Image (tube, rainbow, N blue to C red):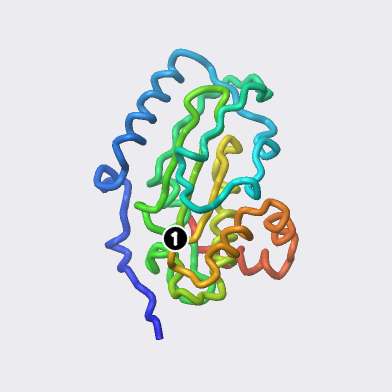
Amino acid sequence: MQIPTVLDVSELPRRGDQADYVDKENIERSEEILYQHRLQELSLLTDYETLYDIEDTPVEGLNASSLIKEESNISIQSSSSNLEPIDAQEIYDLTASISDPEHPLTLGQLAVVNLNDIEVKNASDKSQIGEILLRITPTISQCSLATLIGLGIRVRLDRCLPKRFRITILLKEGTHQTEKQVNKQLNDKERVSAAAENPQLLKVISNMLSSCE
């Protein structure tokens, strides 16, 4: 019988420890974006979800860099607010506090979400959409709640993040028996929308998110 990893709350990465985790590329990109934002006003995309279809994208070998796609004909809506860059630590903070649906612990304590498994690419100009790639590690390889956990994470991020980000959630390679099937379910917009309309499922997800600040 597999025993899930359990981390003490004091072991979870915090903002003060970020320098040990955030890669140099993300830091340089964030600095570049902040500089550009001081020079000009940027607009938010209004219809970002129609630009991409996850079913046309192979999930194997995905990374945040490969997910960035330039579009020459994106409709831009004027906005006076600047775009603030988001980093991996912020995504971790949003998801680590989610309660596991089976154990009385958080996803951070169970190492389902890990800072090193989160990639963030902020858009550098108006023709790009930011990308967030989060790889989760189920507590056991035959975990029957992997899809539910991933859905809870997606709902949390959809509620908290600006619409200018495309979110991709994948099971970490080799961590689950039905990895490909779960990955497809978690990133199929129609299936996610249908699940979000299920009252019983929404109740479970609400309980999972009740531990979030």
Q: Quadrant of residue 161?
A: top right
The residue located at (51%, 72%) in the rendering is 177
Is 79 located above or below residue 170 in the figure? above
Between 136 and 201, the residue placed more toward the observer is 136
Residue 117: x and y, percent? Answer: 39, 53
Q: Is residue 137 left or right of residue 189?
A: left
Percent position (x, y) of residue 128?
55, 28
Q: Is residue 150 left or right of residue 9?
A: right
- Front one among 16 and 172: 172
Question: Type of residue at label 1?
Answer: Lys
Task: Name the residue that disc number 1 marks.
Answer: 172
Q: Quadrant of the N terminus?
A: bottom left
- Tell me the residue at 52%/40% (across/down): 67
Quadrant of the image occupied by residue 26: top left
Q: Residue at x 44, y 68 (%)?
A: 175
Question: Looking at the picture, does residue 33 appear above or below residue 1?
Answer: above
Q: Label 1 neighbourhood size at 10 Å, few (<14), some (14-19), many (20+)?
A: some
Compared with residue 50, is residue 76 higher up or lower down, i.e. above or below?
above
The image position of residue 94, as x and y in percent, is 47, 52
For image coordinates 45% across by 38% down, the residue present is 65
View extreme (top): residue: 39
Q: Callout 1: helix, strand or loop?
A: loop
Camera-nearest residue between 54 and 117: 54
| Residue placed furthest toward the bottom | 1
Figure disc tally:
1
